[in-house]
Image: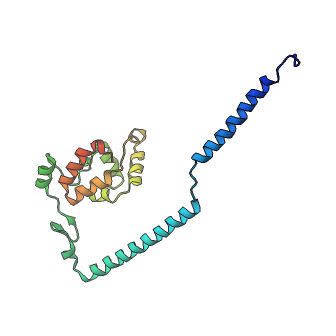
């Protein structure tokens, strides 16, 4: 190569432009970055959490002390018994939902079909009450036990829908299912 004929500016100008671009890029990046004070935010959130836990403990204590003095039968909502919970009313369910409903039929829940209901039955989740007390993570475990074809289902709303069924809130359930097609939140 003949370095004598090469112009010094052919090397200097691109080098200078590169250095300037790097410097301005650094300045723009630094000015756009928002600094968060991680430890201070963490301490704030921990304090807030401790306060909320104290309030929860006080509420639970108040609830248990009031339930000790109040008879259980008078605390139960109307239409329920103290030991069994809400009584299933098939006529009300049919009028609100528009079709006949069998007690503890999990297929009423939007997103649960007969095969998924069978998976839940295999895991001893056979009632609306049991479904309402099941976590979403447990619902995912039940679906995963059925294989890959059940992984596409989203069980996030199933415990909530199960609770509405268990409590006999058929109008609320019908309204929710109309609003949220395919059981998605």
Q: Residue at x 70, y 36 (%)?
A: 20
x 31%, y 81%: residue: 65
Q: Is residue 111 visible?
A: no
Q: Is residue 92 left or right of residue 158?
A: left
Residue 107 shows up from this direction: yes
Between 134 and 142, the residue placed more toward the observer is: 134
Residue 140: where, in percent of width, then height?
40, 49
Quadrant of the image occupied by residue 162: bottom left
Q: Quadrant of residue 13?
A: top right
Residue 28, given in percent of the width and then of the height, sits at 61, 42
Q: Relative to 169, does residue 33 appear above or below in the rendering?
A: above
Q: In the figure, 76 relative to 28: above or below? A: below
Give percent across and percent down for residue 95: 11, 50
Where does the N terminus fall, quadrant-wise?
A: top right
Q: Is residue 15 left or right of residue 112?
A: right
User: Compared with residue 105, is residue 45 higher up or lower down, i.e. above or below?
Assistant: below
Q: Nearer the viewer, residue 160 or 9?
A: 9
């Amino acid at each position: 190569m003949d370095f004598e004929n090469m112009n010094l500016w052919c090397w200097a100008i691109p080098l200078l432009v590169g250095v300037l671009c790097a410097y301005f890029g650094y300045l723009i990046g630094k000015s756009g970055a928002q600094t968060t004070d991680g430890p201070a935010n963490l301490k704030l959130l921990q304090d807030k959490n401790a306060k909320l836990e104290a309030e929860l403990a006080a509420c639970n204590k108040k609830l248990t002390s009031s339930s000790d003095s109040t008879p259980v039968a008078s605390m139960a909502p109307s239409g329920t018994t103290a030991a069994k919970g809400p009584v299933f009313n098939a006529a009300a369910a049919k009028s609100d939902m528009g079709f006949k409903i069998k007690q503890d039929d999990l297929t009423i829940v939007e997103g649960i079909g007969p095969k998924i209901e069978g998976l839940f039955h295999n895991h001893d989740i056979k009632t609306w009450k049991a479904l309402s007390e099941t976590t979403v993570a447990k619902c995912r475990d039940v679906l995963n036990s059925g294989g890959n074809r059940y992984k596409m289902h989203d069980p996030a709303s199933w415990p909530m829908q199960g609770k509405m069924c268990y409590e006999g809130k058929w109008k609320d359930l019908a309204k929710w299912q109309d609003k949220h097609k395919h059981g998605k939140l």
